Amino acid sequence: MKILGIESSCDETAASMIEIKNGDMKVLSNVVFSQIDIHKKYGGVVPEIAARNHIIKILPVINEAVKKTKPDVIAVTAGPGLVSSLLIGIETAKTLSYVWQKPIIGVNHLAGHIYSSWLEVKKKPTFPILALIVSGGHTELVLIKSHLNFKIIGQTRDDAVGEAFDKVAKMLGLGYPGGPAVSAMAAKFYEQKSISKKIKFPRPMINDDNFDFSFSGIKTSVLYQIQKDKQYQQSLPEYCAAFQQAAIDVLIHKTVKAAKKYKIKSVLLAGGVAANLELRKQLGENIKKELPNVGYHIPDLKYTTDNAAMIAAASYFYARTKKFTPWQKIKVDCNMKLKSVK
Ligand code: KG4
Ligand code: ZN
């Protein structure tokens, strides 16, 4: 089966063709047009500008992904995301579904992030699975007992972790998007081993008896400390490393605790913040130490930030149920919840 995936939920216009043979997923093309350079000067994504650029890019991106092969199924992100951005992907997918007479599947963006761990892998995750989704809009721990059987057991009560990275970067004058900028700056601190570790930030909710998160307090603590420290510009690597470590510690602590409680067999790390090398490394080390029999799965870096291959991957499991929605009924749902399919 060949699936065309289309993703336009935020500021990436993406299309991908994947081929599934005996359950193995091969990525035939993975085209992503990132609007980061366009939104940089505004310090964040401007929805109206994002939508206009999706309109310009969506057909060239799809053309490049499809080449001459027609897919058997069209998969498109239906939510959650920016309504004006989602609409461009959905309307394009509906038109292609009508013209090519191919079934269409509306995919949850978070299910896409989860299923990025099935793309081009030799060893697939085994159930029960715990997914830690960390992105610009979400921080969620999802228990998955079988395909498409999702239960959110923890989530952020305020900012998403990627959002906290972006806001801290803004405060420190590091630009947008903040995640890569903060992590690159933090890496400098690890290289300069001579600097003392004098800056510390709180680990909110780390010992609470639940799997929820809170990141806005760490962010505010960064703000208070730089207001007091007249020379903070000289310690940017240390500020970034201390902030990053506070966020990573909470994520790891809760993930390992949940994996133990639910007797998990595989832990997945997904979403844009999964591109963070320290998080990838430290979560792996902790799982190896505390849960040596649990598998640890992280997608290739190109599938962590928003892409359409992950949307196509998730859609395969919906397509297997053959419960297609007629193209006339596919709708954008900007607050779409991660629902199980029975
Ligand atoms: O999944 P994604 O591409 O888009 C959403 O669905 O939100 O995630 C984007 C988020 C941004 O907040 C960005 O700053 C963060 O992922 N990010 C990172 C890194 N690379 C991207 N955060 C921390 N470290 C990184 N290396
Ligand atoms: Zn995303």
Image: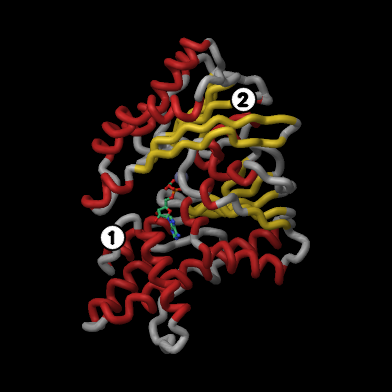
- Residue at the location (46% across, 43% down)? 306
Q: Label 1 is placed on what type of residue?
A: Gly
- Residue at the location (26% across, 43% down)? 46
Question: Which is more N-terminal, label 2 or label 1?
Answer: 2
Where, by quadrant of the figure, is residue 315 drawn?
top right
Say whether residue 164 is visible: no
Instruction: Name the residue tied to disc 2.
Output: 2
As helix, strand or loop, the secondary structure at mark 2 comes to strand
Q: Position of residue 302 (x, y in %)?
A: 51, 48
Instruction: Name the residue tied to disc 1.
Output: 175
Say whether residue 276 is visible: yes
- Residue at the location (35% across, 59% down)? 178
Question: Residue 10's mark?
Answer: none
Tell me if mark 2 has few (under 14), some (14-19) or many (20+) residues whose alpha carbon lies within 10 angstroms of its own. many
Observer-nearest residue: 203 or 279? 279
User: Looking at this rendering, what residue extends furthest in the front direction?
Assistant: 68
Q: Label 2 is placed on what type of residue?
A: Lys
